[in-house]
Image (cartoon, helix red, strand yellow):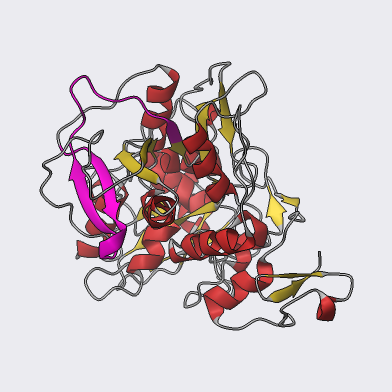
Amino acid sequence: MTATSKYVAAIVAASCTILTSAAAHAVTCDNLGSGFPGIEVNIGGSSAAKPLIKQISGTLATKGIRVVYWKLGSCAGLTDITTATNVTGTGAGTYWDESNSLNELACDAPSGGTPLDVAASDVYPSSCNNITLLGTQKDFHDTSPVQIFSFIVPPSSSKNVISEEAAQVVFGFGGATYAVTPWTDPLYIFKRDPTKSGSYSMLAKLLAFDASSKIKGTIPGAGDTQAIVDAVSASTQYDKTIGVVSEDYADLYRTSTTKQIKILAYQDKGAACGFYPDSSKSTYDKVNVRTGLYPFWGPLHFITSVDGAAKPTNAQVAALLSYFELTTVATADAGITLLEADKKTMIDNIVTAYTIPNCAMKVTRSSEVAPQTKPASYDPPEPCGCYYDYKVSGATSCTVCTNDGPCGSGKCRYGYCEAK
């Protein structure tokens, strides 16, 4: 079999079975006005994490913390925070009005720019051009929400699954030298800038590209996650078109009435069939991610300055991380005590943003995704799988409870009996 015919055959795989427009900006991001009280925390990086940051911003505002978000790309955010580079730009900052359905607003960077308090990344820093954190910085990711990524095509595409071998050729060669039908035209292989995007750095790891390899294809529009969705959904070359986006965007648009995309099942190297992130193409339960059958995912990474005891030096950052991590992240001078109601609210935020709370996972990984590298079994210290199941599907097999009484040796968490 020739190399070309081998890769063409690889695609024949089995499948197992809105953001609002920013308003006109008139304020600087360090002075949002009396209508937006609270101490501001600047978080920048991953465009894929924007829906989650939007959701948590409303909760944090009630705690006196105002999130200002800078859409840079994971690797660009990591570069800025490790080189102490200020973010700049007219209308480049984003914040949300929690009193008006989290209406999205824009603000201008102050004169001279502003430093990031937190960099948000989809990937480990080493996956972004081997970025190394400073000795005074720490990557908080051990109990962070899990971000998922998917291959997407137009709804009218005849394809439902892509194999690791096929994806490697599609994004590694872009229709040149070697090609996999029907994705043979680089004009319709949509990508982000892999030097700035964490999701495409992870894609390279998933497909075993050399670290210096460049993903082939076309960067549409602004080159962010939304631009990939827009390009794929608008394409009339249904079978030629493909892209990769985070699941929060993919889930939002697979049932949208304005723009629509379709998620492909992914068949990992050596696997007998392909899997969706969910138990089927029409559900949202993330079962195959949570149990390790679907590999294209990773924990969100939050990088910030810490003291000699590896505690955040900024109390507001510690509070923000506590809500993301669903556990108390202590500062140099004080800890943030999270009540169960606070954690439940954050789980709701995470679910609304189509990400997975760490407490609902049954597997974990300590390094970036790689072909045939299986995640390890995981038993969360405070499991929330029962409540998560109910939130995403409206049903759970777990016992309903208001206290530990009906839970035997387990514990009542968020209204359902968990194993511990």
User: Bounds of the magenta span?
Assistant: 91-119
Residue occupying the far right of the picture: 409
- Where residue 257 appears, as percent x and y from the top left, is 25, 76
The number of numbered badges drawn on the structure is 0
Q: Is residue 95 magenta?
A: yes
Side (left or right) of 24 relative to 418: left
Q: Is residue 54 magenta?
A: no
The image quadrant that residue 231 belongs to is bottom left
**Residue depicted at 59% across the width and 32% down the height:** 331
Residue occupying the far front of the picture: 34
Side (left or right) of 256 relative to 143: left
**Residue depicted at 64% across the width and 37% down the height:** 367
| Of residues 243 and 355, the one drawn nearer to the viewer in this rendering | 355
- Where residue 113 appears, as percent x and y from the top left, is 24, 23
| Of residues 124 and 410, the one drawn nearer to the viewer in this rendering | 410
Q: Can residue 207 be seen in this view?
A: no
Q: Can residue 141 be seen in this view?
A: yes
- Where residue 398 appears, as percent x and y from the top left, is 73, 80
The quarter in which the C terminus is drawn is: bottom right
- Where residue 4 appears, as percent x and y from the top left, is 44, 48
| Of residues 382 and 146, the one drawn nearer to the viewer in this rendering | 382
* Residue 358 to residue 40: above or below: below
The image quadrant that residue 101 belongs to is bottom left
* Residue 263 to residue 167: above or below: below
Side (left or right) of 165 relative to 244: right
Side (left or right) of 188 relative to 399: left
**Residue depicted at 39% across the width and 41% down the height:** 46
* Residue 288 to residue 281: above or below: above
